[in-house]
Image (cartoon, coloured by chain):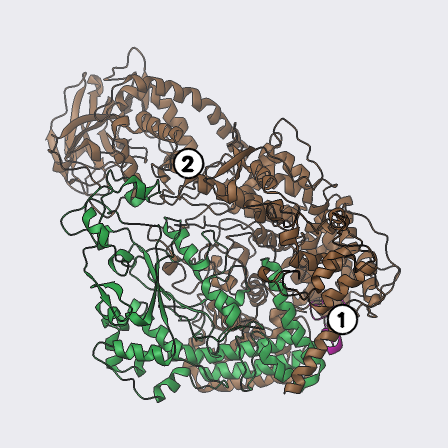
Chain colours: A green, B brown
Amino acid sequence: MNPCHDYLNQLTRRQFFAGAGLAMGGVALNLLAPRLRGAVTAEAGARIHPALPGLPHFAPKAKRVIYLHMNGGPSQLDTFDYKPGLQSQFNVELPDSIRAGQRITTMTSGQAKFPVAPSIFKFAQHGRSGAWVSDLLPWTAKLVDDIAIVRSVHTNAINHDPACTFLMTGSEIPGKASIGSWISYGLGSENNDLPAFVVLTPKFSSKVSAQALFTRMWSSGFLPGGHNGVALRAQGDPVLFLENPNGVDATTRRAMLDGLAKFNHHAQARHGDPETLNRIAQYEMAFRMQTSVPDLTNFADESPATLDLYGPDVKTPGSFAASCLLARRMAEARGANPPSRLGPTRQLARRSSPPVSRHGSSLLRARHRSKATRLARRHARRLGWRIWSHGLLAGDAHADQLRPRSSPALL
Amino acid sequence: MPSLRLILILGFAVATASVVRAQEIISFNEHIRPILADNCFACHGADAGHRKAKLRLDQGAEALSSREGIRAFAAGDLVESEAWQRIMSDDPEEVMPPPDSHKLPLKPEQRALIKRWIKQGAVYQNHWAYEPVTRPDLPKAVGGAKTNDAAIDRFIGAKLADKKLKLAPEASREVLLRRLTLDLTGLPPTPQEMDAFLKDRAPDAYDRVVTRLLASPRYGEHFARYWLDVVRYADTHGLHLDNVRNLWPYRDWVVSAFNRNLSYDQFTIEQLAGDLLPNPRIDQLVATGYNRSHLTTSEGGAIEAEAEARNTGDRADTTAAVWLGLTANCASCHDHKFDPLTQREYYQFGAFFKGLADRCWDGNIPKPGPIVLLADAQQQARIEAIARELPPLQAALSARAQTLPMMLPAPAAEAEKPATPSNTSADKPEKKAEPAPINYEVVWAEDGDMPVAANFGALAPAGEWCSGSTVPVVGGQRALRLEGAVNERVFTFATGETPLVVNQQAVAFVHFNADPARTPRAVSLEFVSAEKTKRYVWGDPAALRPSADGDVVVGPMPAAGAYARLEIPALAAGLASKKAYRGLRLTQSDGAAWWDHAGTTCTSAKALDDPLLTKSAWVRFMQSNARDLTTVPLPNDIVFLLGLSSTQQNDAEKKRLENYYRDYIYGPTRGALEPQVHAVRRLLAEQVHYELTLDASLIARELPEPLPAHILIRGQYDKPGERVQPATPAFLPPLVASGPRASRLDLAHWLVEPKNPLPSRVAVNRFWQQLLGAGLVRTPGDFGAQGDPPTHPELLDWLASEFMSSGWDMKYLVRLIVTSRTYRQDSRVDPALLELDPTNKLLARGPRLRLDGEVLRDQALAVSGLLRPEIGGAPVRPYQPINIWEPVAFGGSNTKTYVQDHGDALYRRSLYTFWKRTAPAPAISTFDAPSRENLCVVRGRSNTPLQALALMNDVQHFEAARAFAERLLAQPGDDAQRLAFAFRTVTARTPDRTERALLTEALITHRAHFAADTAAAAKILTNGEGKAAAAQPAPEIAAWTLVANLILNLDEAVTRN
């Protein structure tokens, strides 16, 4: 694929429609405007993030995709990837036939020994599918029939940077488009109040030596820049520059935007450039986001029982729990359509408060089923079989922190 | 609504069909090749490895020839044209493209084109871009072009006339001046410049403005920015830690090259191979930073062969795209599918870069070598002298050091520990019996003071190191003579490279020999340390200045005429274990004395943990205590080696580090080496002084013996195939090699060889794209079969030929374009033209473009009067929302935390904003700036709500609006005049009646609001760090700030008309 070519094709298509619409006068333009990538008018059915023409090319089952990238999460060997044969190999030196000359990271390359470390957690089969799940995940085990477990994804990279870049973009070498950008590019989004592709970035203490999550992991690469993931940030403005400057309230901003729209319509009449109409729409979308995003990130309308389901961290912005809840809220936010000033989550709040079961599993299952959403758990391993211990084995303390870590991903 | 959709579709068909009229001759390159390239070449193209039926359709000789009586294309004969029959077939076994290729059947209009092409004789053409550049005759002056119009307009006009169109009238002078000023300098014109231009009715007024702008230093800054996108310049390494990279002098070189109007051929040669020119100047070396601008890493566990292959590939891909418009990377795994570039040729092209001397690792340091110091002539002479004098002295020192026994453990037997200590204790050596503490003596001052890079050039300290038969010495050949009252004399106990920490115990000592005739009244000793330590006094304490932290009176003055050893113990003096010290401070009250042989007796618990005894302990200490190693006063190449993990160091590097440790760091032999080491240390300290104080830049140097280049099978770094030598692709004119192995310099010359058909076309196309919004070839990085053919092939050739015959004169080319009527057209578009030519390929109007993020920021700073004019220098860190760098950075990265600058640095041009590759500045990246991880020959121009938010709310933009408001309030006149001035300062034109009314309405609205809400008005003044002038009431400034914010967000402000 040639990025420039592709980009210009995009432009061409957009401008063609724009041009053709103008040629047929104002009525046609208004009907066509929703077809313009990024443009929106108040007509029903308008989509600000349309799909590519011809897509989707088969009836979709999923309506949205949530991708949990759990950098440094527990290993697949301790969670889903049951390897009973390893038990008999406890503390046995990793055979050359398995290692086969594989590289290892600096973390372990200094080791004189590579003892095999079987999981210390018990595994059992669950659900009608009989999937093996370790007792680390008792609640997930109850949901296992709603989960697709993919064990085959792995990378050749042993280091975090290239491996994560590979997982997100399909290539270890930076510059390719990320998975979310492709979805935004191909399928767009039905929500007019939020960007099509949103990324929740974590927050952690500066004392933590955390793995880096480079922006390239949600970059649009060679796709048009509009498909970049929009980071909903845990600190500072949730969306960059979302908050009005000191001393500017919503009324003042509205007044400024009303003036701006008049100017820009005037300019459009002068120049005839359809991009100006698009710009007016983008400014209006920006204004709506100023309302919809804070609504989204404000958990006040969640019942204590629901918050409980996510654990105590849920109130800490940027925590895994808070990000999960935020992801759910976004998945449920339909967006005002036709666009209205009423934020999407307030519409949510009008629905009955959700039923809560003791452990939340039935609630979650109900949610997933009602949304016809399927979860696919994808265990991405940075290297084929990482079964040796990081350090020497001692007693039964050879799981978790001793295991070279994987990056599980929940799709 | 359905019926309207239908109309739309019909409209599409009409528009497409109108592209080719019935009587037009079908051109293979323009019409047929793109269809075949998309649908056929993958199996019937240049890649022999995947060719089906041994048939290639990209070359006429094969496609038109008969094989066993069958021809793919038969001139004029559809029935005999097998390819046509296959295209038209209904049989899934027969039809082309075959269903399993996942390609759709050819569209009716594509079939129609092929049909007519066959009927017209199926004439093949070679791919246009690989044909020599011709110099076409000027077409007739039609399409609105006049006989005396520029050549550009004649070509554009001819094509317009074909479509019954003509050039649009010239844009208004206001629009024109803003367009030109923004395009040439990246800044808007000032009202004074506008007035001058509007008044100047001379016929050459416009030309003179062009001359003025081309001479402005802002021109170089603006044009450099496009080039920096192309060559992916940034201020960090880009991978893993994404640490700081010190390459900004290269950025400044690019600015200067544009401003000096360096010719494009020289511009090319100096960047690719300035180091290989005879006696290269410093600036020519800086230019070679081009070869150092790619992503690098030093991630532990990364594989050298892989990193090296990636670096080479990146260099080859970028050079091929930038100069040749080739998507060379496609040939890294197999022959190029669409262009005549074989896989072998790809690796031959990469082989030119295999001689580069930089290691594939960056060591996570800012200046991985080779580097050049930006020295003036005098400094340069000195640096060169040091480089000459140092090696023989160092060799002699090494030879002597080799003869001295080292205490345990010998460096070769050291257990190497990982560079980044892991968080488990499991890989530490198994517990052994604790060894007994080790005592050893380090002599820091024997024949002279320890030279310190940081103090270089400072006044010499008191006293003189003397030698001769009358000089009594304890060791070595010299002793220090101090006379009179000496209030402070320091023996430095480290050159700064070795951290000195009290281990179990340390006793500092010095030898003192008072002149019997002039015995001092008192002397004292004290540790130089950040800790509070006691002073030890011999003689009468009253003779000395009072001590801040207390004295220990040891006793009377030692007997004169002989050396006495004076000692102070660290623990008793108040220097606890693990605390650091840097030297010994002495004072002397009157008299005269000899001082000699100063140092420390150390007691160490474990040799393995003592940096003075064990190399690995030293390395570990340096790495953990000075992680970014930026300011460590060591030679830059040693700093680099310290930045590498032991698995990354090659044997030569390991040896070099070991030798350096043995010769300069290892403690116990220092005294014995002193006579040899002293001169070396002085020179080294001076060298380090220059490295630390002078600006430096990463450059290219050539290895004596280049690394071997191989074809990588399927592009795999670990599957080297046949070895190859540097060579250029066979489908382009041959390269003239200056020696047995073609060099980078040969490559550079070849890239600007006039016979080479690509570089001139690719270059003029980029300039055209920059000034007209889109290239004549709309795929500026792909001039191959998959790229777009030129919209105006003759014009492209004419410009390329003109560019070369001007001596590759970039300013001349720019002037040629911006003075054309084509460039000066009005950008207004009517619906009919928009429908006919939505993307303005025909150029029947001027282009209307959204400004880049940098220009928008600079524009806001310029109109508000905040913009700082300084050119060049280290990058700055202006306002940035919190939490941009932090969530994406590794813990150990030195770009983990964004520390914003203050004052003038907030208002520099955006060119100078620090560019962190893994998190570029949002003010710029929001507007489609690339990450600079890969080459970028064209930026997108998206239109998103995030851009709206940035322009409305970014503190940089809002503060600019506030400063603009204050500037407006300082203007003479009433509201209406000020509003008009504001509007004109940004848009360069006077508002019309509607706009004046809207401006007034906006001011009245905001004024009423802030008059009623003075608290909000006061808050408006708190945006940004600049202080508001007290002269105006807050509500007034606030109201005007919102008006300014509105004006800076106008479609017309963010767009250039």
Q: Calculate the distance from the C-alpha at mark 1 to the C-alpha at mark 2.
A: 65 Å
**Percent position (x, y) of residue B26?**
80, 60
With respect to residue B250, does A66 lie above or below?
below
Chain letter behind tag 2: B
Q: Nearer the viewer, residue B759 or B621?
A: B759
> Where are the magenta residues, as a range?
B828-847
Q: Looking at the rendering, in which quadrant would you find the C terminus of chain B?
A: bottom right
The reply to whether dot 1 and dot 2 touch (C-beta < 8 Å) is: no
With respect to residue B34, does B716 lie above or below?
above
> Which numbered disc covers residue A130?
none
Question: Which of the 4 quarters of the picture holds residue B500?
Answer: top left
Question: Which of the 4 quarters of the picture holds residue A335?
Answer: bottom left
Going 67% across and 61% down the picture, which residue do you hit? B774
**Percent position (x, y) of residue A336?**
46, 84
Disc 2 residue type (three-letter): Asn
Residue position for label 1: B17
Disc 1 residue type (three-letter): Ala
Residue position for label 2: B636
**Percent position (x, y) of residue B441?**
20, 25
Query: Is residue B953 toward the left or the right of residue B859 in the image?
Result: left
Q: Badge 2, how many Cα within 10 Å: few under 14, some, many 20+? A: many
On the question of residue B539 being in view, the answer is no
With respect to residue B90, does A305 lie above or below?
below
Chain letter behind tag 1: B
Q: Badge 1, how many Cα within 10 Å: few under 14, some, many 20+? A: few
Main SS category, magenta section: loop
Question: Which of the 4 quarters of the picture holds residue B18?
Answer: bottom right
Q: Indicate the secondary structure of the residue bearing disc 2.
A: helix
